[in-house]
Image (cartoon, grey):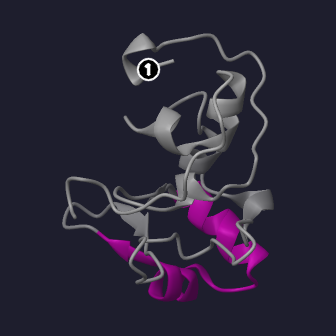
Amino acid sequence: MAESDWPYPVSEFECHRCGNCCRGDGFVAVTPEDATRIAAHLELSEAAFEATYARRTEDGALRLVDQGDALRSCVFLQADNTCRVHAVKPTQCRGFPMAWRPPDALEICAGLRAAAGLPFPIRRTISRRTG
């Protein structure tokens, strides 16, 4: 199934823990409620959470930082492709892939590919946009 065939029905999504949704171009928005929840989970003040794991944009929005690796992995993505803050993950992350998904989601997401009857994806790399 090609990306152009979307939307297609996905009634049950099962995460395959490929980690691809946690890598690549883009950003993770952090709401004030997310910041409070994640900071408490990490046993940090909200100021310490922000200083360590997030940055403010010019318009004041809060976004998670990445690990600084070539794949631009989320700061909370662990080596086994699990999320360090899964139980309290940001609202944006909770919405993937049913409430939102990037344009290349069908190419990179093992769970969506399985739901569409496609083989496991290759590991995500930096997009064609950024090289």
The quarter of the displayed image where residue 113 is located: top right
Q: Nearer the viewer, residue 20 or 64?
A: 20
Q: Nearer the viewer, residue 13 or 28?
A: 13
Q: Quadrant of the C terminus?
A: bottom left
Question: What is the residue that sits farthest to the front in this orientation?
Answer: 119
User: For the residue marked with disc 1, what is the amino acid?
Assistant: Ala
What residue is rendered at 75% in x and 61% in y?
Answer: 86
What residue is rendered at 58% in x and 42% in y?
Answer: 109
- Residue 124 in the image: x percent, y percent? 48, 58
- Identify residue for label 1: 2
- Above/below status of 69 relative to 23: below
Q: In the picture provided, is 52 more to the left or to the right than 89?
A: left
Q: Nearer the viewer, residue 95 or 32?
A: 95
Element marked by disc 1: loop
The quarter of the displayed image where residue 22 is located: bottom right
- Residue 85 in the image: x percent, y percent? 72, 68
In this rendering, the count of numbered labels is 1
Using the rendered image of the protein, determine whether residue 60 is visible from the camera's viewpoint.
Answer: yes
